[in-house]
Image (cartoon, rainbow, N blue to C red):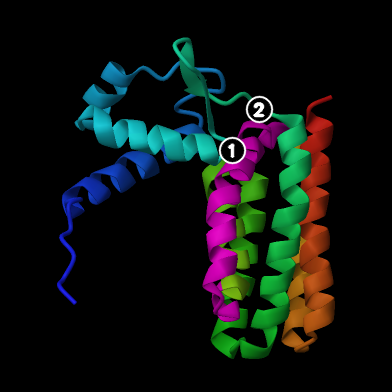
Amino acid sequence: MPIPEFHAPLERDLLRDRAYATLRDAIVDGTLAPGERLRDPELCQWLGLSRTPVRDALSRLEQDGLVESAPQRYTRVAPLDRRAARDAFPIVAAVHALAAELGVPRLTATDLDAMREANASFAAALKDVDVDAALAADDAFHAVLLTASANAELTGVLDRLMPRLRRLERLRFGSLAGRASTRQHELILAAATAKDSTTTAERVRENWLSLGTLIDRSFE
């Protein structure tokens, strides 16, 4: 069989991915605020890219729920959406719980130490009201279980949903004073250390659902 011709240059894919990652991160960290208009000329100048990879990136971000558009009217950063958060958090909780169930039997002593260190960093960041450090430490804590699960499909689902939730968490961080995540992390770690996959998964699910409840209340 003849080798098919490859018409799409690799460089185009790399540029599209670069535009997507940069715009996604700017939306998540609030550099691009909810409701802000996204105009192609401005984005192209900022990113140093042509219109094609920028438009491809915006289309992908719209699928992720971070951008919305109306033909011939506007393309803008999606507003904060209470209903979208209510829909997404149970899915994220279930996926992380499955990662825990699959990952606990594979955890090593080094993995457990990494979870302890991440939770200590998380507690310190919450005390200092350091949003960036808190989210990074929380991601690091749960990433240990996700990596141990060795399931790329779980990672794929979370890659699509987590930016939307982290944006909400970041922008509503000041309203989340009631969060008990540090203690919940300790309970997760205790179950994981005991190699109790079922209890670890239940506690991971509770951790994410409780955050979803706080986010939901923040809209009030």
Q: Quadrant of residue 97?
A: bottom right
Label at residue 103 = none
Inter-mark Cα distance, 2 to 1: 9 Å
The structure residue drawn at horizontal position 53% and vertical position 61%, both measured from the top left corner, is 156
Disc 2 residue crowd, few under 14, some 14–19, many 20+, Cα 10 Å: some
Task: Identify the mark nearer the N-term, 2 or 1.
Answer: 2
| Foreground pick, 71 / 141 | 71
Task: Return the x and y of residue 164 as percentages of the image width and height.
Answer: 60, 41
User: Which element carries disc 2, helix, strand or loop?
Assistant: loop
Range covered by the magenta-colored residues: 147-175
Quadrant containing the N terminus is bottom left
47 versus 196 height, above or below: above
User: Which element carries disc 1, helix, strand or loop?
Assistant: helix
Q: Is residue 186 left or right of residue 4?
A: right
Q: Are marks 2 and 1 in contact (CB under 8 Å)?
A: yes
Q: How many marks?
A: 2
Q: Residue lying at the far front in this picture: please name it.
A: 1
The structure residue drawn at horizontal position 62% and vertical position 74%, both measured from the top left corner, is 145
Task: Return the x and y of residue 18 as percentages of the image width and height.
Answer: 30, 45
Can you identify the residue that label 1 sits on?
A: 167
Q: Quadrant of residue 131?
A: top right
Residue 61 lies in magenta, yes or no?
no
Q: Of the residues shown, which amino acid type is indicated by label 1?
A: Arg
Q: Quadrant of residue 16?
A: top left
